[in-house]
Image: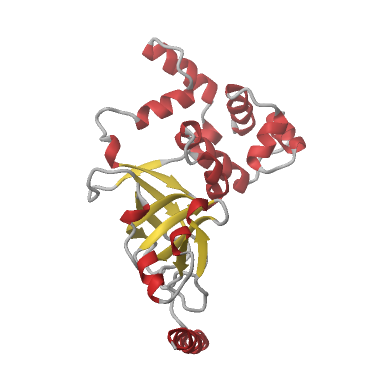
Amino acid sequence: MSYAGKNLKYIRKQREWTQEEMANQLQIKRSLVGAYEEERAEPRLEVMETICAKFSISLEEFLFQDLALLNAQGAQDNGSNNSYMERRRALKSDKTISLSSMVTFVPVKAAAGYLAGYADPEFLDELNTFTLPMLAPGDYRAFEIIGDSMLPTPSGSVIVGEKVGDFKEVKNSNTYIVVSNADGVVYKRIITNDDRAKEGSENNENKLTLLSDNPLYEPYQVNATDIVEIWKAVYIIHKAGAQPMWNVDQLAGVVNNLQDQITSLKKKLN
């Protein structure tokens, strides 16, 4: 027996959302939410994966366990009225786990909402967390990246970043996760103001240059005032065997692009 429809309704009621509001959260039609809750249809796998990621529950729990019953049992066992979601959050703040070692994970599907929710505790609570034993105490966050702009780092890699509290801490040519109002979440190298000043750039104090490792992509500038967060990349996680291979056409394109950039730089210097 699947509890998907019943659990979807329970999660929605816990947050006091209408079916329209839940549909907006899942980016599906309101009629589908009604069909799922009334068990006239079974949610598609991608919808269930979105629900599980958004509300920090496993697919097995969502499909095969009655969350309302778990909530009631948990409240009885703990002598409290804590909801299932609240108990999930309590696990994250377990005193036996150092909060400084917890890494909040932002998957690609959550990146769009991250710009609005990066400072919202409720939004962050909905994201999954993990620990890495090699991390020193600090403020860390992990971001899934897609695309080939940072090759040879493959698409789908997870970048573990440490929070940068001051732009002055940014080191020239190091890699960072940059969260800005213009571009959302991107993974790039940052060229510092001092380095760009040598190239004769104007208004350096108000802009940062973002550079891709893949030279097929042109560097570009963003306004410093447009940036809301910067995370220094400390670890890169990707699947074994996921390292991409350059083909001959790509290598030829890289060489031509580098030659164009060198020619342009020489003109600026002259």
Residue lying farthest to the top in this orientation: 79
Task: Find residue 144 and report its horizontal and vertical position in percent.
Answer: 46, 55
48 in relation to 191, above or below: above
Whether residue 114 appears in this view of the structure is yes
Whether residue 192 appears in this view of the structure is no
Which quarter shows the C terminus? bottom left
Q: Quadrant of residue 243?
A: bottom left
91 in relation to 100, above or below: above
Q: Looking at the image, which residue is at 77% across and 36% down?
A: 31
Q: Quadrant of residue 137?
A: top left
Q: Is residue 247 found left or right of 39 in the rendered image? A: left
Task: Find residue 69 and report its horizontal and vertical position in percent.
Answer: 51, 19
Q: Looking at the image, which residue is at 60% across and 33% down?
A: 4
Count of numbered labels shown in the rendering: 0
What colouring style does the render use? secondary structure
Task: Find residue 176 and report its horizontal and vertical position in percent.
Answer: 39, 59
Which quarter shows the N terminus? top right
Residue lying farthest to the right in this orientation: 31
Residue nearest the viewer, comparing 167 with 10? 167
Residue nearest the viewer, comparing 223 with 100? 223
Residue nearest the viewer, comparing 253 with 33? 253
Q: Is residue 231 found left or right of 84 in the rendered image? A: left
Q: Quadrant of residue 50?
A: top right
Task: Find residue 133 and report its horizontal and vertical position in percent.
Answer: 23, 47
